[in-house]
Image (spheres, rainbow, N blue to C red):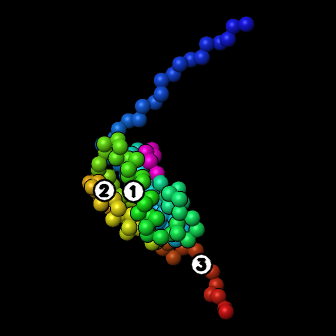
């Protein structure tokens, strides 16, 4: 009985892009940091929960700092040092994540706040009567 020969395929090599986009999504419960190339393909990511923080500690500024440092450490192994920053959300990890990016000596071209703000959209829920 003859076995069919497996096709040998080459692994895809990661293309090094000269610039990246750092997305920071800071909610009240967690902070997620995603680093993409200019086309939007994810290079590295990290979150407070993925760094080992659980429960209420995920929403702290320190957890956001550690998550940002982890994502940038994976990203800078590819020798890319220039980035744009897109921040969204009202969480406590916003400013600390940005501070961690600046401390890592990444050259920032701009920082943009992309938090969605309603222009008098949905009706809010009724007031609580306690």
Q: Residue at x 38, y 47 (%)?
A: 75
Query: Which residues, given as a range, are shown in magenta?
Result: 40-45
Q: Nearer the viewer, residue 11 or 121?
A: 11
Question: Mark 1: few, some, or many residues within 10 Å (few <14, many ≥20)?
Answer: some
Location of residue 82 in the rendering, given as x and y in whole percent from the top left corner: 29, 50
Residue designated by label 1: 69
- Give how far across and how far down residue 101 sits, in percent: 33, 59
Where does the image place residue 41, in percent across and percent down from the top left?
A: 45, 44
Q: Earlier in the sequence, mark 1 or mark 2?
A: 1
Classify mark 1: helix, strand or loop.
helix
Marks 3, 2: nearer the viewer: 2
Residue underneath mark 3 = 123
104 or 108: nearer the viewer:
104
Position of 8 compared to 127: left or right? left
Residue 52 seen in render: yes
Closer to us: 19 or 76: 76
- Determine which residue is flagged by label 2: 104
Nearer mark to the viewer, of 1 and 3: 1
Q: Secondary structure at mark 2?
A: loop
The circle drawn on residue 55 is none
Q: In the orientation shown, which residue stands out farthest toward the top?
A: 1
Pick the quarter of the image with the C terminus.
bottom right
Q: Check if residue 77 falls in the magenta segment.
A: no
């Amino acid at each position: 009985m003859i076995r069919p020969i497996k096709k040998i395929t080459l692994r895809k090599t990661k293309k090094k892009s000269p610039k990246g986009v750092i997305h920071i999504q800071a909610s009240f419960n967690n902070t997620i940091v995603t680093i993409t190339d200019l086309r939007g393909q994810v290079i590295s990511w990290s979150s407070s929960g993925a760094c080992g923080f659980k429960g209420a500690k995920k929403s702290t500024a320190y957890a956001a700092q550690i998550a940002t440092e982890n994502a940038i450490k994976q990203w800078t192994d590819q020798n890319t040092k220039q980035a744009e920053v897109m921040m969204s959300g009202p969480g406590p990890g916003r400013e600390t994540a940005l501070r961690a990016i600046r401390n890592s000596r990444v050259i920032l071209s701009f920082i943009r706040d992309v938090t969605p703000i309603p222009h008098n959209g949905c009706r809010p829920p009724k007031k609580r009567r306690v």
